[in-house]
């Protein structure tokens, strides 16, 4: 199956994969070749992919978006994407602190929801960095 992972910064991944699991508004789903076609909302969370049935899983964080599945392809149009190799722990810690301040100072439901989304996304990025350090 062909996976395309795209954000406003361009295409991050364009490759063949065996399996992708990702967070959606309906819950976490696994997508394989010949999957039933769907279009759904991706939620902030961890996307896990495997290039073969026996390969190690690769984790990527996304900040929401749209997912389109066809029989032989998966396209994720994400608001933002972070992969292990692009993350700096000090920058992530600062982003977490900034998001916590945004949560504390939110003046309405919309700004509170966005602050919580940013906090969740930054926390997921920190998990990726921690996982990379343990390897």
Image (spheres, rainbow, N blue to C red):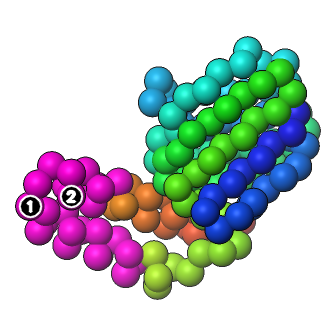
- Asked whether the beta carbons under mark 1 and mark 2 sit within 8 Å of each other, the answer is yes
Q: Quadrant of the N terminus?
A: top right
Instruction: Say whether residue 104 is magenta.
Output: yes
Q: CA distance from mark 1 to mark 2?
A: 7 Å
Q: Quadrant of residue 102?
A: bottom left
* Residue at the image position 71 percent from the left and 64 percent from the top: 10
**Mark 2: which secondary structure?**
helix
* Residue at the image position 80 percent from the left and 43 percent from the top: 3
Q: Residue furthest top?
A: 36
**Residue 59, relative to residue 17: is it above or below?**
below
Number of residues whose C-alpha sits closer than 10 Å to that of mark 2, classed few (under 14), some (14–19) or many (20 or more): some
Identify the magenta region. 93-117
Can you identify the residue that label 1 sits on? Answer: 107
Instruction: Say whether residue 132 is magenta.
Output: no
Q: Which mark is residue 111?
A: 2
* Residue at the image position 72 percent from the left and 28 percent from the top: 69
């Amino acid at each position: 199956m062909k996976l395309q992972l795209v954000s406003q910064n361009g295409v991050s991944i364009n490759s063949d994969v065996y399996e992708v699991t990702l967070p959606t508004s309906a819950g976490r789903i696994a997508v394989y070749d010949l999957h039933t076609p769907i279009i759904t909302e991706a939620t902030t969370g961890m996307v896990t992919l495997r290039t073969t049935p026996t390969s190690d899983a690769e984790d990527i964080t996304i900040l929401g978006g749209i997912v389109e599945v066809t029989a032989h392809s998966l396209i994720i149009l994400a608001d933002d994407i972070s992969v292990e190799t692009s993350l700096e722990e000090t920058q992530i810690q600062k982003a977490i602190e900034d998001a916590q301040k945004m949560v504390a100072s939110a003046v309405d439901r919309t700004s509170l929801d966005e602050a919580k989304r940013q906090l969740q996304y930054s926390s997921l990025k920190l998990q990726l960095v921690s996982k990379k350090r343990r390897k």
